Image (spheres, coloured by chain):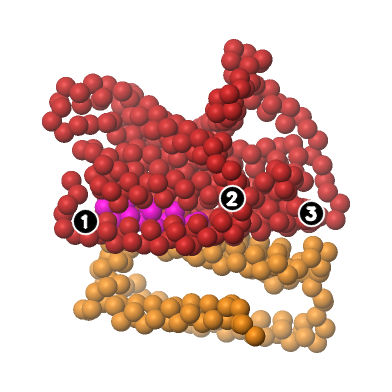
């Protein structure tokens, strides 16, 4: 087993174990913390693939942004003694069934698919290439999606300001 | 084995080759990682102890006092004595607290600062890992520390801790923006995010001089925003002693408290070294173009001395802030960020981009 494989299995184990813990923990803040571990290990996988930019974005956006927001809202709303209620047995059984069927379908499809190693030249993952691709309008350019997403974000921001604004009535 | 205090690259390569020659590759990697880990641990202990001493002396100086002066000459062993006392304190376990998260929180804070320091260049060849996205990486991992503070505040089951954690969360999330944008201004000028290239780019002049006024504005904005991000005064609302006893770490004792304490000082050190590296040339000596003799004399000072000197200067500036300005209120704090720093920063980036586009920098 090479170091790379060892690290992959380490990260994979962490991701699987903490993913399960995230949905089974009955204390909501612990669940959020376990989710943080899952997201950080995913960033570790990206680092292993030498895709540093994506890894850093994963850390900033998910671990540093979204998890912090989740924890923040938990801090505002819940008490330390609170535990989530046990769901009913039938719910548990059906949720488990759905999870098992979904997982086996995914695994079956992945195993069935014949992965062909691509022989296209790698265009690199450095910040330069990504930045150029985001604003280029030619082939492999992402200018239009980038602008569309910007408009979406802007409207989401305006929407949240309107929702949060105090009404004078 | 060529050893020189001016360039550690060949020294590191020699160690690397010797390890790979005598050990299987897996073991060599583990040994290298262990060595680097131990070096950083020792570095943390030494710098942490020194910074606490420096802070007390600077504070005393600002307040016209003497400061620690009993243990050793000028009190230099005071922090070591304090540290031994901290180690021997009882670890109090709190009833009705979330034990797992309570014990986990100090580790998250300290691991985040450990991850950040790995990318800092201390001298030529003295850098644990040189990512092509260096600055982005440091911003990313340092944003993990706030999770530890939030967890500590919530799991203590104490209202003061909770208020402290909330304040610190709001503060760090908002000031992260200004830190990122002010660094982005310099990335525009440097054209790279890799720390080694940023330092190399300052061989003929530091970025704070090369970038004219926008670089200077970015430096000041970075100082303000990063002081806030490290929870230091005048932005220390998260642990405001007079209102919240100690904020998010009220319930911690002994070594767990020491972790928070150490992480706070090390974060200050990391922020200061980023400021020194990005704005003040890192380990690059001070050069005037045209003054060959002067430049030659400056080259005799080893790079890590330059680096430590610049970092110490920025740390002194931050301590100066802390002991000069009164603490802000939470609304003033958020106003300062969202109404002043953020717009100034955005305009500043535009001005810098224009200057780089026109080629007005040198």
Q: Residue at x 45, y 40 (%)?
A: B272
Q: Which badge, 2 or 1, is on the more N-terminal residue? A: 2
Q: Residue under label 3, please give it.
A: B158
Q: Residue under label 2, please give it.
A: B328
Q: Disc 2 versus disc 1: distance between alpha carbons?
A: 35 Å
Q: Is B187 part of what is drawn in magenta?
A: yes
Residue B331 shows which numbered tag? none
Residue B141 shown left or right of residue B257 in the figure: left
Residue at mark 3 shares a chain with residue at mark 1? yes
Q: Which residue is drawn at 73% across and 27% down?
A: B85
The location of residue A84, given as percent across then percent down, is 79, 73
Q: Residue furthest left?
A: B290
Q: Nearer the viewer, residue B134 or A108?
A: B134
Q: Disc 3 versus disc 1: distance between alpha carbons?
A: 51 Å
Q: In which quarter of the image is the N terminus of chain B?
A: top left
Give the class, few, some or many, for how many residues have Cα within 10 Å of label 1's Cα (few <14, many ≥20). Answer: some
Q: Chain B is drawn in which colour?
A: red
Q: Give the range drawn in magenta.
A: B174-189
The location of residue A39, given as percent across then percent down, is 56, 64
Disc number lying in front (2 or 1)? 2
Residue at mark 3 shares a chain with residue at mark 2? yes
Q: Residue under label 1, please give it.
A: B355
Chain under label 2? B
- Residue B266 appears in view: no
> Which lettered chain is shown in orange?
A
């Amino acid at each position: 087993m090479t170091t790379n494989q060892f690290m992959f299995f380490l990260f994979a184990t962490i991701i699987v174990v903490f993913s399960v813990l995230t949905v089974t923990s009955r204390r909501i803040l612990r669940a959020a913390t376990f989710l943080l571990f899952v997201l950080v290990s995913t960033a570790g996988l990206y680092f292993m693939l030498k895709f540093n930019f994506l890894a850093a974005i994963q850390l900033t956006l998910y671990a540093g942004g979204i998890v912090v927001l989740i924890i923040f809202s938990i801090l505002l709303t819940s008490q330390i003694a609170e535990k989530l209620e046990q769901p009913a047995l039938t719910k548990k059984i059906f949720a488990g069934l759905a999870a098992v069927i979904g997982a086996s379908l995914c695994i079956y499809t992945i195993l069935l698919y014949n992965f062909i190693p691509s022989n296209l030249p790698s265009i690199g993952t450095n910040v330069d290439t990504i930045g150029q691709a985001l604003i280029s309008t030619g082939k492999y350019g992402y200018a239009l999606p980038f602008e569309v997403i910007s408009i979406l974000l802007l409207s989401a921001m305006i929407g949240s300001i309107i929702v949060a604004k105090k009404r004078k009535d | 084995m060529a050893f020189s205090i001016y360039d550690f690259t060949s020294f590191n390569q020699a160690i690397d080759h010797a390890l790979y020659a005598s050990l299987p590759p897996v073991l060599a990697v583990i040994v290298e990682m262990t060595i680097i880990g131990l070096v950083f641990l020792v570095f943390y202990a030494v710098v942490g102890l020194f910074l606490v001493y420096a802070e007390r002396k600077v504070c005393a100086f600002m307040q016209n006092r003497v400061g620690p002066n009993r243990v050793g000459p000028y009190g230099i062993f005071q922090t070591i004595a304090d540290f031994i006392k901290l180690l021997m304190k009882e670890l109090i376990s709190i009833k009705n607290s979330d034990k797992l998260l309570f014990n986990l929180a100090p580790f998250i804070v300290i691991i985040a600062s450990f991850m950040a320091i790995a990318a800092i260049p201390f001298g030529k060849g003295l850098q644990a890992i040189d990512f092509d996205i260096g600055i982005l990486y440091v911003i990313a991992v340092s944003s993990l520390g706030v999770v530890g503070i939030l967890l500590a505040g919530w799991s203590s089951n104490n209202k003061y801790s909770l208020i402290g954690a909330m304040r610190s969360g709001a503060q760090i999330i908002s000031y992260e923006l200004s830190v990122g944008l002010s660094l982005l201004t310099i990335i525009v000028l440097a054209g790279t995010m890799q720390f080694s290239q940023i330092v190399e780019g300052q061989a003929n002049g530091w970025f704070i001089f090369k970038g004219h006024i926008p670089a200077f504005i970015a430096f000041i904005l970075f100082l303000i925003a990063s002081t806030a991000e490290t929870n230091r005064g005048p932005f220390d609302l998260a642990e405001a002693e007079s209102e919240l006893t100690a904020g998010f770490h009220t319930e911690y004792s002994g070594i767990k408290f020491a972790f928070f304490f150490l992480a706070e000082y090390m974060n200050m050190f990391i922020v200061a070294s980023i400021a020194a590296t990005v704005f003040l040339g890192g380990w690059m000596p001070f050069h005037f173009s045209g003054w060959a003799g002067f430049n030659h004399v400056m080259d005799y000072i080893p790079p890590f001395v330059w680096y430590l000197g610049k970092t110490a200067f920025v740390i002194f500036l931050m301590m100066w802030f802390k002991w000069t300005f009164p603490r802000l209120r939470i609304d003033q704090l958020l106003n300062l960020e969202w109404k002043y720093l953020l717009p100034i920063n955005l305009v500043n980036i535009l001005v810098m981009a224009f200057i780089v586009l026109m080629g007005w920098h040198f």
